[in-house]
Amino acid sequence: MQKKISVAKKNKIPKTLIAFVAIFILGVVIAYFVQKDDMLPIYNPADINPSLVDESVRDIRSNHRISHFKLINQLGDTITEKNFEGKIYVADFFFTRCAGICPKMTKQMDRAAEDLVDEKEVMFLSHSVTPVMDSVPILAAYAELYGADPEQWMLVTGDKKQIYDLARKFYFAVTTEGEGDEADFIHTENFILIDKEKRIRGFYDGTSEKDVDRLIGDIRILLKSYE
Protein backbone atom coordinates (compact mmCIF):
# COMPACT_ATOMS: atom_id res chain seq x y z
CA MET A 1 0.00 0.00 0.00
CA GLN A 2 2.79 2.38 0.91
CA LYS A 3 4.47 1.56 -2.35
CA LYS A 4 1.39 2.55 -4.39
CA ILE A 5 1.13 5.92 -2.62
CA SER A 6 4.77 6.62 -3.38
CA VAL A 7 4.29 5.84 -7.07
CA ALA A 8 1.23 8.12 -7.23
CA LYS A 9 3.23 11.00 -5.79
CA LYS A 10 6.00 10.44 -8.31
CA ASN A 11 3.51 10.52 -11.17
CA LYS A 12 1.93 13.76 -9.94
CA ILE A 13 5.12 15.85 -10.24
CA PRO A 14 5.70 15.43 -14.00
CA LYS A 15 2.04 16.24 -14.77
CA THR A 16 2.30 19.51 -12.85
CA LEU A 17 5.53 20.35 -14.61
CA ILE A 18 4.05 19.56 -18.01
CA ALA A 19 1.06 21.78 -17.28
CA PHE A 20 3.34 24.61 -16.17
CA VAL A 21 5.51 24.31 -19.29
CA ALA A 22 2.42 24.20 -21.51
CA ILE A 23 1.04 27.38 -19.93
CA PHE A 24 4.41 29.10 -20.26
CA ILE A 25 4.72 28.18 -23.95
CA LEU A 26 1.16 29.34 -24.60
CA GLY A 27 1.94 32.65 -22.93
CA VAL A 28 5.07 33.11 -25.04
CA VAL A 29 3.16 32.34 -28.23
CA ILE A 30 0.34 34.76 -27.34
CA ALA A 31 2.84 37.50 -26.42
CA TYR A 32 4.68 36.95 -29.71
CA PHE A 33 1.57 37.35 -31.82
CA VAL A 34 0.33 40.34 -29.81
CA GLN A 35 3.70 41.99 -30.34
CA LYS A 36 3.57 41.18 -34.05
CA ASP A 37 0.14 42.78 -34.31
CA ASP A 38 1.54 45.96 -32.75
CA MET A 39 4.49 46.18 -35.13
CA LEU A 40 4.26 48.41 -38.20
CA PRO A 41 5.82 47.43 -41.52
CA ILE A 42 9.02 49.05 -42.77
CA TYR A 43 8.72 50.18 -46.38
CA ASN A 44 11.51 50.15 -48.94
CA PRO A 45 11.38 51.41 -52.55
CA ALA A 46 10.78 47.91 -53.93
CA ASP A 47 7.57 47.73 -51.85
CA ILE A 48 6.05 50.87 -53.39
CA ASN A 49 4.03 51.39 -56.57
CA PRO A 50 6.77 51.99 -59.19
CA SER A 51 4.91 55.00 -60.60
CA LEU A 52 5.73 56.82 -57.35
CA VAL A 53 9.40 55.80 -57.23
CA ASP A 54 12.34 57.24 -59.12
CA GLU A 55 13.82 54.63 -61.45
CA SER A 56 17.23 54.93 -59.79
CA VAL A 57 15.97 53.46 -56.48
CA ARG A 58 13.15 51.09 -57.50
CA ASP A 59 15.14 47.92 -56.81
CA ILE A 60 16.23 48.82 -53.26
CA ARG A 61 14.74 46.25 -50.87
CA SER A 62 16.28 47.15 -47.51
CA ASN A 63 17.82 49.90 -45.38
CA HIS A 64 15.92 52.77 -47.01
CA ARG A 65 16.26 56.01 -45.04
CA ILE A 66 15.17 59.61 -45.60
CA SER A 67 18.15 61.53 -46.93
CA HIS A 68 19.82 64.74 -45.85
CA PHE A 69 17.82 67.86 -46.71
CA LYS A 70 18.14 71.61 -46.27
CA LEU A 71 14.94 73.65 -46.54
CA ILE A 72 13.35 76.88 -45.26
CA ASN A 73 10.35 76.84 -42.91
CA GLN A 74 7.50 79.32 -42.42
CA LEU A 75 9.62 81.38 -40.02
CA GLY A 76 12.42 81.76 -42.56
CA ASP A 77 14.67 79.40 -40.59
CA THR A 78 16.89 76.87 -42.32
CA ILE A 79 15.99 73.34 -41.26
CA THR A 80 17.63 70.00 -41.94
CA GLU A 81 17.03 66.39 -41.00
CA LYS A 82 18.73 67.20 -37.69
CA ASN A 83 15.62 69.13 -36.62
CA PHE A 84 13.86 65.76 -36.62
CA GLU A 85 16.48 63.76 -34.73
CA GLY A 86 14.81 61.52 -32.18
CA LYS A 87 11.38 62.38 -33.61
CA ILE A 88 8.57 60.47 -35.26
CA TYR A 89 7.16 62.67 -38.01
CA VAL A 90 4.53 62.81 -40.73
CA ALA A 91 5.46 64.22 -44.14
CA ASP A 92 3.29 65.38 -47.01
CA PHE A 93 3.48 67.47 -50.21
CA PHE A 94 1.12 70.34 -51.02
CA PHE A 95 0.97 73.90 -52.35
CA THR A 96 -0.86 76.88 -50.92
CA ARG A 97 -2.80 77.72 -54.11
CA CYS A 98 -4.13 74.19 -54.47
CA ALA A 99 -7.93 74.28 -54.42
CA GLY A 100 -8.43 70.53 -54.77
CA ILE A 101 -7.14 68.03 -52.23
CA CYS A 102 -4.76 70.35 -50.35
CA PRO A 103 -7.31 72.08 -48.08
CA LYS A 104 -8.69 68.68 -47.06
CA MET A 105 -5.17 67.38 -46.41
CA THR A 106 -4.20 70.44 -44.41
CA LYS A 107 -7.32 70.21 -42.26
CA GLN A 108 -6.61 66.55 -41.55
CA MET A 109 -2.96 67.30 -40.77
CA ASP A 110 -4.14 70.01 -38.38
CA ARG A 111 -6.49 67.52 -36.73
CA ALA A 112 -3.70 64.97 -36.28
CA ALA A 113 -1.37 67.65 -34.90
CA GLU A 114 -4.04 68.77 -32.42
CA ASP A 115 -4.69 65.19 -31.30
CA LEU A 116 -0.96 64.64 -30.70
CA VAL A 117 -0.13 68.10 -29.37
CA ASP A 118 1.14 66.70 -26.06
CA GLU A 119 3.44 64.19 -27.74
CA LYS A 120 6.69 66.12 -27.96
CA GLU A 121 8.38 63.32 -29.92
CA VAL A 122 5.96 63.78 -32.84
CA MET A 123 6.31 66.40 -35.58
CA PHE A 124 4.77 67.22 -38.97
CA LEU A 125 6.53 68.35 -42.17
CA SER A 126 4.68 69.76 -45.19
CA HIS A 127 6.70 70.39 -48.38
CA SER A 128 5.57 72.92 -50.97
CA VAL A 129 5.72 71.50 -54.50
CA THR A 130 5.65 75.04 -55.91
CA PRO A 131 8.42 76.63 -53.84
CA VAL A 132 8.89 79.57 -56.22
CA MET A 133 5.31 80.70 -55.53
CA ASP A 134 5.24 79.56 -51.90
CA SER A 135 7.63 82.08 -50.39
CA VAL A 136 8.25 82.32 -46.65
CA PRO A 137 5.60 85.07 -46.11
CA ILE A 138 3.00 83.02 -48.01
CA LEU A 139 3.83 79.90 -46.01
CA ALA A 140 3.68 81.92 -42.80
CA ALA A 141 0.19 83.20 -43.67
CA TYR A 142 -0.96 79.69 -44.61
CA ALA A 143 0.48 78.26 -41.38
CA GLU A 144 -1.31 80.94 -39.36
CA LEU A 145 -4.58 80.21 -41.15
CA TYR A 146 -4.40 76.57 -40.01
CA GLY A 147 -2.80 77.24 -36.64
CA ALA A 148 0.42 75.39 -37.42
CA ASP A 149 2.84 75.71 -34.48
CA PRO A 150 6.34 75.76 -36.03
CA GLU A 151 7.70 73.84 -33.07
CA GLN A 152 5.43 70.95 -34.05
CA TRP A 153 4.46 71.48 -37.69
CA MET A 154 6.82 72.94 -40.27
CA LEU A 155 5.76 74.08 -43.73
CA VAL A 156 8.81 74.29 -45.97
CA THR A 157 9.99 75.73 -49.23
CA GLY A 158 13.40 75.61 -50.92
CA ASP A 159 15.17 74.36 -54.02
CA LYS A 160 12.59 72.68 -56.25
CA LYS A 161 15.00 70.05 -57.57
CA GLN A 162 15.82 69.03 -54.00
CA ILE A 163 12.14 68.82 -53.06
CA TYR A 164 11.51 66.81 -56.22
CA ASP A 165 14.30 64.36 -55.30
CA LEU A 166 12.93 64.00 -51.77
CA ALA A 167 9.46 63.29 -53.14
CA ARG A 168 10.54 60.77 -55.79
CA LYS A 169 13.55 59.08 -54.20
CA PHE A 170 12.72 59.09 -50.50
CA TYR A 171 9.05 59.80 -49.61
CA PHE A 172 7.37 58.46 -52.79
CA ALA A 173 4.64 61.08 -52.92
CA VAL A 174 4.48 62.35 -56.52
CA THR A 175 3.23 60.53 -59.58
CA THR A 176 5.22 61.99 -62.46
CA GLU A 177 8.81 61.90 -63.59
CA GLY A 178 11.00 64.82 -64.59
CA GLU A 179 13.69 67.16 -63.37
CA GLY A 180 11.69 69.41 -61.10
CA ASP A 181 10.24 71.64 -63.82
CA GLU A 182 7.08 73.62 -63.11
CA ALA A 183 4.75 70.97 -64.57
CA ASP A 184 6.48 67.92 -63.07
CA PHE A 185 4.65 67.70 -59.79
CA ILE A 186 1.35 65.90 -59.47
CA HIS A 187 1.45 65.23 -55.77
CA THR A 188 -0.53 62.51 -54.06
CA GLU A 189 -2.84 62.83 -51.07
CA ASN A 190 -0.52 60.61 -49.06
CA PHE A 191 0.72 61.30 -45.55
CA ILE A 192 3.94 59.40 -44.93
CA LEU A 193 4.86 58.20 -41.43
CA ILE A 194 8.58 58.31 -40.60
CA ASP A 195 10.10 56.74 -37.49
CA LYS A 196 13.05 57.91 -35.40
CA GLU A 197 15.44 55.94 -37.60
CA LYS A 198 14.18 57.87 -40.67
CA ARG A 199 12.41 54.78 -42.07
CA ILE A 200 8.98 54.82 -43.73
CA ARG A 201 6.41 53.02 -41.56
CA GLY A 202 3.12 53.81 -43.30
CA PHE A 203 1.15 55.62 -46.01
CA TYR A 204 -2.25 57.21 -45.35
CA ASP A 205 -4.88 59.04 -47.38
CA GLY A 206 -4.61 62.58 -46.07
CA THR A 207 -8.09 63.46 -47.29
CA SER A 208 -9.75 60.66 -45.31
CA GLU A 209 -10.72 61.18 -41.67
CA LYS A 210 -10.83 57.41 -41.18
CA ASP A 211 -7.34 56.90 -42.60
CA VAL A 212 -5.94 59.77 -40.55
CA ASP A 213 -7.45 58.12 -37.47
CA ARG A 214 -5.44 55.05 -38.47
CA LEU A 215 -2.34 57.24 -38.77
CA ILE A 216 -2.86 58.63 -35.26
CA GLY A 217 -3.25 55.10 -33.92
CA ASP A 218 -0.08 53.95 -35.68
CA ILE A 219 1.86 56.89 -34.27
CA ARG A 220 0.81 55.84 -30.78
CA ILE A 221 1.96 52.28 -31.55
CA LEU A 222 5.36 53.67 -32.63
CA LEU A 223 5.60 55.83 -29.53
CA LYS A 224 4.92 52.79 -27.36
CA SER A 225 7.60 50.80 -29.17
CA TYR A 226 10.21 53.35 -28.06
CA GLU A 227 9.28 53.21 -24.37
Image (cartoon, rainbow, N blue to C red):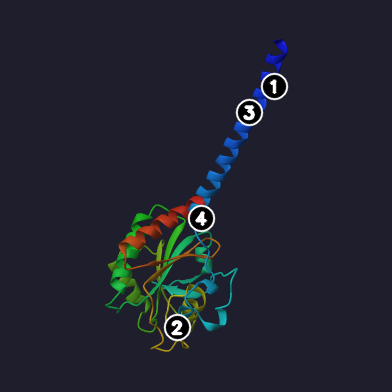
- Secondary structure of the residue carrying tag 4 is loop
- Secondary structure of the residue carrying tag 3 is helix
Reading the image, the residue beneath label 4 is 39
Give the alpha-carbon distance from disc 2 to disc 1, as whole Å.
79 Å
Check contact, mark 4 vs mark 2: CB within 8 A: no
| Disc ID at residue 10 | 1
| Disc ID at residue 15 | 3
Reading the image, the residue beneath label 2 is 160
- Mark toward the start of the polypeptide (4 vs 2): 4
- Mark toward the start of the polypeptide (2 vs 3): 3
Residue at point 71%, 10% (across, down) = 2
- Secondary structure of the residue carrying tag 1 is helix
Viewer-side label of 2, 3:
3
Where, by quadrant of the figure, is residue 98 drawn? bottom left
Give the alpha-carbon distance from disc 2 to disc 3, as whole Å.
71 Å
* Amino acid at circle 1: Lys
- Residue 48 locus on image (x, y percent): 49, 73
Residue at point 35%, 74% (across, down) = 139
* Amino acid at circle 2: Lys
- Secondary structure of the residue carrying tag 2 is helix
- Residue 204 locus on image (x, y percent): 39, 66
Q: Residues within 10 Å of mark 3 (few under 14, many from 20)?
A: few
